Image (cartoon, rainbow, N blue to C red):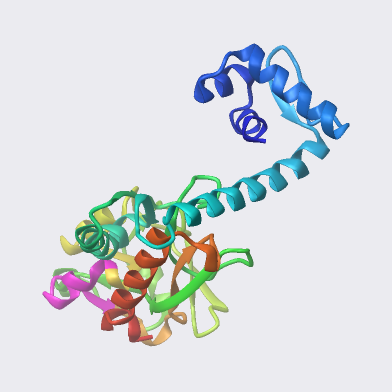
């Protein structure tokens, strides 16, 4: 099963053999023996690729689940469910990860020196099962899934600009006033030219940014310099707002806050490293008043 899963994930016998420290013929024989044993073709082989059959796709999901159960049993027998050990991989968006998740991870590693930490802070939706992530801190409404999710707070979208900008431009009073302002548009994974307003987000205004920035940090920096208005999440400009470098507008027209969840895949059978980090992250984020204002 382990060999089959590795072949399916790598898409080839040679690469699977390399990763498993086996010879390609040995991998080929193992897959053939498995197919003969269960009496069904799992892989379609061509000169250029290896693809799963319909039966193979279903069998792959079963194998992953069975192998995960075996790993849980091994970990429990070895005591991994009692004492945090191993490598812990945590993901979140870039700014949120650096500002709030990284301090939690550092504190966690101080408490549990037998754990090695890895952070993956990216502004894209990460599939934590396929990418081998232990814990994700995710902002936004979650689709239905088999993942365990614990809500820890909320954040708001805000539209903001610098006081220097408003010395030259009248503050917008309604969302439609935005068409008369210079807009700075982030181009990240969740960026859209259609900005929604109201408790249910039913009204919208299509903005036409004159400046596009590929990071939220750059969009915020341009706004702080008085160039125009941008829309970001409240925590991203918390310090700039507190220092008076930015002010928000149209607060009364904004959408409902977005939820923040701590997510992991293992549920109650999670290894000690996952359970202990989740407990710390949930406690730390829930006690941060910035995320309890929605």
* Residue 246 within the segment the image draws in magenta: yes
Give the x, y percent position of residue 199. 50, 85
Give the x, y percent position of residue 83. 35, 60
Of the pair 273 and 160, the residue shown nearer to us? 273
State the residue lying farthest toward the front: 77
Q: Quadrant of the N terminus?
A: top right
Find residue 151 and report its image quarter: bottom left
Q: Residue at x 32, y 75 (%)?
A: 285
Q: Quadrant of the C terminus?
A: bottom left
Of the pair 9 and 112, the residue shown nearer to us? 112
- The residue segment tinted magenta is 236-248
Q: Is residue 252 left or right of residue 198?
A: left
State the residue lying farthest toward the right: 39
Q: Residue at x 62, y 14 (%)?
A: 24
Q: With respect to residue 90, does 56 lie above or below?
A: above
Q: With respect to residue 16, does 193 lie above or below?
A: below
Q: Is residue 224 left or right of residue 105?
A: left
Count of numbered badges drawn on the protein: 0
Q: Residue at x 19, y 69 (%)?
A: 165
Would you say residue 246 is visible in this rendering? Answer: no
Of the pair 110 and 75, the residue shown nearer to us? 75
Find residue 22 and report its image quarter: top right
Q: Is residue 206 left or right of residue 217?
A: right
Would you say residue 270 is visible in this rendering? Answer: yes
Give the x, y percent position of residue 61. 70, 46
Q: With respect to residue 100, does 59 lie above or below?
A: above
* Residue 7 within the segment the image draws in magenta: no
Give the x, y percent position of residue 157. 38, 73
């Amino acid at each position: 099963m382990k060999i089959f899963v590795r072949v399916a994930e790598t898409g080839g016998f040679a690469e699977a053999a390399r990763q498993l420290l086996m010879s390609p013929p040995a991998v080929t024989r193992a897959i053939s023996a498995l197919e003969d044993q269960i009496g069904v073709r799992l892989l379609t082989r061509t000169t250029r690729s290896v693809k799963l059959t319909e039966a193979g796709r279903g069998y792959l999901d079963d194998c992953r689940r069975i192998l995960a159960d075996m790993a849980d049993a091994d970990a429990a027998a070895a005591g991994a469910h009692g004492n945090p050990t191993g490598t812990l991989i945590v993901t979140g968006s870039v700014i949120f990860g650096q500002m709030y998740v990284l301090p939690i991870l550092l504190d966690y590693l101080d408490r549990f020196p037998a754990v090695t930490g890895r952070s993956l802070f990216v502004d894209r939706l990460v599939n934590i099962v396929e990418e081998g992530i232990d814990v994700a801190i995710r902002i936004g409404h979650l689709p239905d899934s088999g993942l365990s999710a614990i809500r820890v707070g909320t954040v708001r979208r805000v539209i903001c600009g610098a006081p220097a900008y408003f010395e030259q431009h009248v503050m917008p009073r309604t969302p439609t006033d935005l068409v008369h302002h210079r807009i700075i548009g982030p181009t990240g994974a969740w960026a859209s030219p259609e900005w929604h307003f109201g408790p249910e987000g039913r009204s919208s205004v299509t903005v036409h940014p004159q400046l596009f920035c590929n990071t939220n940090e750059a969009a915020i920096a341009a706004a702080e310099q008085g160039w125009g208005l941008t829309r970001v999440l409240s925590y991203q400009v918390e310090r700039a707002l507190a220092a008076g470098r930015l002010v928000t507008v149209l607060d009364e027209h904004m959408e409902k806050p977005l939820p923040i969840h701590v997510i992991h895949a293992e549920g109650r059978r999670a290894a000690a490293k996952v359970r202990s980090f989740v407990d710390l992250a949930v406690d730390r984020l829930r006690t941060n008043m910035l995320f309890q204002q929605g």
